Amino acid sequence: MDVKRAMEIYRSSDMFAVHLGGDSVWIENVDEANGMATVQVGTTPQKTKTVSVDRLHEGKPEREH
């Protein structure tokens, strides 16, 4: 995913299927300048990660190798 699309999803009131590896995630913040996103993994608000937006995928989950 690119930064522009991550921002569109973050700002939208609609729900989008976003995945990090095989995990469903919710985009909580996007750092446009650095190409990073803070995501909530699954349904646990305390389980967050900050990752490069290019690791995020829209649609069906992709497995990390």
Image: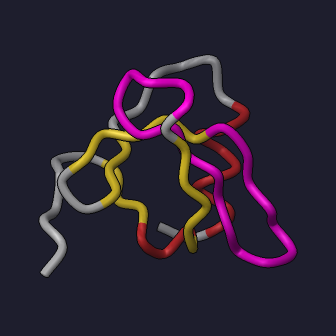
The image position of residue 17, as x and y in percent, is 33, 36
The quarter of the displayed image where residue 25 is located: top left
Q: Residue furthest right?
A: 33
Residue drawn at 60 percent across, 54 percent down: 6
Q: Position of residue 7 (x, y in %)?
A: 70, 50
* The one of 33 and 9 positioned closer to us in this rendering: 33
53 to the left or right of 7: left
Q: Magenta stretch containing residue 32, yes or no?
A: yes
Its colouring scheme is: secondary structure
Horizontal relation, residue 1 to residue 33: left or right: left
Q: Is residue 41 magenta?
A: yes
The structure residue drawn at horizontal position 35% and vertical position 59%, both measured from the top left corner, is: 57
- The extreme front residue here reads 46
Q: Nearer the viewer, residue 7 or 28?
A: 28
Residue 46 relative to residue 29: left or right = left
Residue 11 % position (x, y)? 73, 33
**Residue 30, horizontal then vertical, whole percent:** 74, 54
Image quarter in which the C terminus is found: bottom left
Magenta span of residues: 28-46
Above/below status of 38 relative to 63: above
Total marks in image: 0
Q: Based on the displayed image, in which of its 4 quarters is residue 50 positioned? A: bottom right
The structure residue drawn at horizontal position 37% and vertical position 44%, both measured from the top left corner, is 18
Q: In which quarter of the view is residue 13 placed?
A: top right
